[in-house]
Image: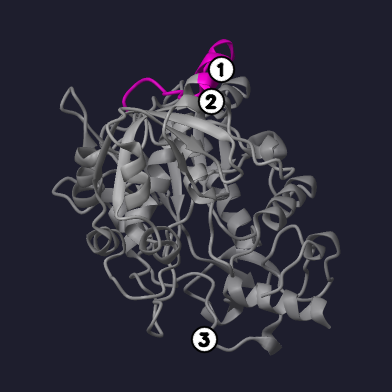
Amino acid sequence: MALAGAVVAKAPTKGCPFVSGFLLNEPVQNFLPKSSVLFSSKANLFPTPMSSSPAPSFSGIVLRKGFRVRSSLIEPDGGRLVDLVVPESDRASKRDEAASLPQIQISRIDLEWVHVLSEGWANPLSGFMRQAEFLQALHFNFLRLEDDSIVNMSIPIVLAIDDLQKEAIGNSKDVSLLGPGGNLVAILRNIEIYKHNKEERIARTWGTTAPGLPYAEEVIISTGNWLIGGDLEVLEQIKYNDGLDHYRLSPKELREEFERREADAVFAFQLRNPVHNGHALLMTDTRRRLLEMGYKNPILLLHPLGGYTKADDVPLSVRMEQHKKVLEEGVLDPDKTVVAIFPSPMHYAGPTEVQWHAKARINAGADFYIVGRDPAGMSHPTEKRDLYDPDHGKMVLSMAPGLERLNILPFRVAAYDKVQKKMAFFDPLRPQDFLFISGTKCFDLMDLFFTI
């Protein structure tokens, strides 16, 4: 789909009513098959955790046991937020040392993981996983800490090397990492090299080894047969120089911004596509419900994923421009919304990956997480069906080990109300008045408009 920046800058006045930031006003019933769906219309969209003691709920929000209204931000996993970037005063000496060590060239996606680790998104990880951490993440979806507590970690964060790189490292305990452009990026200390069992990793992460999984083919199958773990010392803050670095706020910077705004609750919403009016309705209504619960100043973290995505996803630059328009046009309140980029690459691993997305937002200060239909999912690569059950993501989040402190906000069903002529929450008593459309169909229609 050839969606370009012009979509944001020059919006049509007719077309899809669901996309915020594009000034789209009228429905497109005549273009839509009756099977088009925006969200699932199943009645039970707010399941409580599947345990013997259901969590309390308030206006559909699934609250954790022992929930109370806070006056301060939630603590990061493990207590203290890690910062793996070398202080400026030490950088010259560290660069000299890095230049003398065995060197490993890393890819753009590896660099994104260095970025993630360096800022504490994967707190309390201090670098690429060694074997014990890898196995815990792969088989248990959590890490056990020294005090016997656990933190969620559903996605292995690892670095692959090939036979030649392994041989070049020899007996060295430390190596340096070179970025895609050949620049020194980091030192990896006290390394451990272990076998990269690719089939096991893919099967455990995605629940299938079917060909055509984008991340698996890009990052796992084509890479080396060894994994190298160790503690990272990142030589300077990761920058991409793409005009979007000012959106890449670290967990520390986000926490400082939430405190500056005197937030007493932070609710996070991740997306990898443009915001549509159903999303906007959901986010606005979520803030209203948090106010009803007793919070004084809940702040929305609108947090698009900014790392690797598959080729047919909307480009990050287009998405960020559209998010900017959403605030400029008042679709979302800019005083109550922080827009930032989440630097993680995307796996499309469904219920396994959505745990990682939620866990990372705890480290940024969020204590509420909005989860939608089929989060982090994709179509099956070889069959005409979804790879994952669309309801399993939110169910898994409500039960996931290590996420007990996070309150889950499942999507409410939103659709275009033909009577009110605007987005509204679905009313099962008058289903004939609502128009459902998939986001993909919206973007296909807009692409058609600009092609014409």
Residue 108: horizontal and vertical position, in percent?
Answer: 54, 49
Disc 3 versus disc 1: nearer the observer: 1
Asked if 74 appears above or below 434 in the picture, the reply is above
**Which kind of residue does numbered mark 2 sit on?**
Leu
Relative image position of residue 424 (x, y in whole percent): 60, 64
| Earlier residue among tags 2 and 3 | 3
Q: Earlier in the sequence, mark 2 or mark 1?
A: 1
Name the front one of labels 2 and 3: 2
Q: Nearer the viewer, residue 190 or 319?
A: 190
User: In this rendering, is residue 186 above or below 167?
Assistant: above
Q: Residue at x 42, y 23 (%)?
A: 81
In this rendering, position of residue 144 left or right of residue 160: left
Image-based side of 361 in relation to 423, left or right? left
What's the CA distance linking mark 2 and mark 1?
6 Å
Give yes or no for contact between labels 2 and 1 (Cβ–Cβ under 8 Å).
Answer: yes
Q: Which residues are magenta?
A: 78-96
Question: Does 190 sit left or right of 8 as displayed?
Answer: left
> How many residues crowd around disc 2 within 10 Å: few (fewer than 14), some, or many (20 or more)?
many
Residue that carries the numbered disc 1 in the rendered image: 91
Quadrant of the image for the C terminus?
bottom right
Left or right of residue 346, residue 393 in this image: left
Q: Quadrant of the N terminus?
A: bottom right
Image coords of residue 171 (percent x, y)? 27, 32
Q: Which residue is mark 3?
A: 35
Give the CA distance from mark 3 to mark 1: 58 Å
Within 10 angstroms of label 3, few (less than 14), some, or many (20 or more) residues? few
Q: Are marks 2 and 3 in contact (CB under 8 Å)?
A: no
Residue 27 seen in render: no
The kind of residue tagged 1 is Arg
Q: Which residue is mark 2?
A: 235
Q: Secondary structure at mark 1?
A: helix
